[in-house]
Image (spheres, helix red, strand yellow):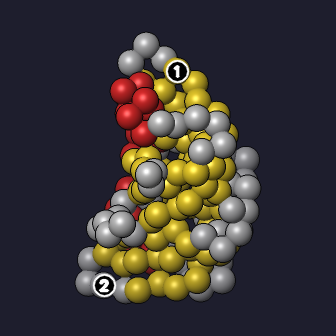
Amino acid sequence: MKISTRNVLNGKVTAIKRGAVNSEVEMTIAGGHRIVAIITNESVEALGLINGRNAFALIKAPLVAIGKDIAGMKFSTRNILEGTIKDITHGSVNGGVTIDLPGGNLMEAIVTEHSIAELKLKVNDTVTAFFKASHVIVAVTD
């Protein structure tokens, strides 16, 4: 599978909550992080999603936000993953931040250079990656 999305996280479907039009699909990835995706019921059927099925969560790097020192804060986003900065690539406007998640997964975020400076991000900092459930694409292999 070749795709342009930087974040491809392999996991297992651990819960499916069906609504009238959409379903909430929960996956657990290595290291125990949960990822929630909101997809149509039609997509749940077309992908053959059931509990225990291997699946991939795809998240575009520009849709990932980063927070630092967030203890005690509450957020409306469902996906909140803590990790350690492995690398920062600087650009003229945006920079890339690679976050090492427990279990060996990497999360890539594209954020502004202003945000990197404002948060004083550096390699080995503990940070939290955030992304909305509606920004997660679910994929499976046949």
Q: Which amino acid does label 2 sit on?
A: Gly
Above or below, 90 relative to 32: below
Task: Give the crowd class for mark 2: few <14, some 14-19, many >=20 residues within 10 Å.
Answer: few
The residue located at (73%, 47%) in the rendering is: 72
Query: Residue 81 location in percent, x, y?
Result: 62, 57
Query: Residue 67 location in percent, x, y?
Result: 56, 61
Residue at numbered disc 1: 18
Residue most extreme to the top: 20
**Residue 75 seen from this side:** no
| Most foreground residue, 91 or 117 | 91
Q: Which mark is residue 127?
A: none
Query: Residue 28 location in percent, x, y?
Result: 66, 50
**Residue 98 seen from this side:** yes
Residue most extreme to the left: 92
| Most foreground residue, 80 or 10 | 10
Q: In this view, does 63 lie to the left or right of 25?
A: left
The residue located at (44%, 32%) in the rendering is: 44
Q: Is residue 91 left or right of residue 20?
A: left
Quadrant in the rendering for residue 17: top right
Task: Give the crowd class for mark 1: few <14, some 14-19, many >=20 residues within 10 Å.
Answer: some
Residue at numbered disc 2: 91
Above or below, 10 relative to 13: below
- CA separation in Å, label 2 and label 1: 42 Å
The residue located at (51%, 77%) in the rendering is: 98
Q: Is residue 24 left or right of residue 72?
A: left
